[in-house]
Amino acid sequence: MSEKSIFKRIIDKEIPADIVYEDDLCLAFRDLSPQAPTHVLVIPKKEIKSVATITDQDQALIGHLYLIIRNIARELGLGNGYRVVANCGAEGGQTVDHLHFHLLGGRQLKWPPG
Ligand code: 5GP
């Protein structure tokens, strides 16, 4: 069996995180290395590796994650806008193999990303 990812260990409360939201399906916590004044990671508790391995059965779960992202953005006062990013795979810059959405805000974000 493969080793637990760092995010699975956060879900299982084996390592601490600054949790901003939790329910039966998902967890949201502040990124350890924030790239903006607000930088939250929103993850499913189900072990999905990346956007590339989402299945048709996950449709409602992914919709739920986006509604939670919207709610967290409101609660954290990101009324002027924010960015939601999912890095996928090596060329996408993904470093943790557990699906996660970055919620970034609190400063003017640039485009295109590097
Ligand atoms: P990725 O590069 O895969 O899109 O994003 C992974 C993110 O997880 C990075 O922004 C990184 O800072 C964050 N990260 C990695 N390890 C930990 C950790 O142990 N705790 C928290 N809160 N964030 C982490």
Image (cartoon, rainbow, N blue to C red):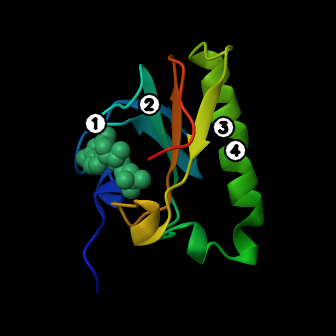
Mark pair 4, 2: CA separation? 15 Å
Among the two numbered marks 3 and 1 on one chain, the one whose residue lies closer to the N terminus: 1
Determine which of the numbered discs, if any, sits on residue 39 in the image. Answer: 2
Q: Amino acid at mark 1?
A: Leu
SS for tag 2?
Answer: strand
Q: Is residue 2 above or below residue 47?
A: below
Residue situated furthest bottom in the rendering = 1
Q: Which is nearer the N-term, disc 4 or disc 2?
A: 2
Image mark for residue 22: none
Amino acid carrying label 2: it is His
Q: Secondary structure at mark 1?
A: loop
Say which label, 1 or 4, has the lower sequence index. Answer: 1
Real-space Cα distance between discs 2 and 3?
Answer: 14 Å
Of the residues under marks 1 and 2, which one precedes in the sequence? 1
Q: Which residue is mark 3?
A: 68
Mark 2 vs ligand 1: CB under 8 Å? yes
Q: Residues within 10 Å of mark 4 (few under 14, many from 20)?
A: some
Q: Would you say the residues marked 1 and 4 are in contact, meaning their CB atoms lie under 8 Å apart?
A: no
Q: Which residue is mark 1?
A: 32
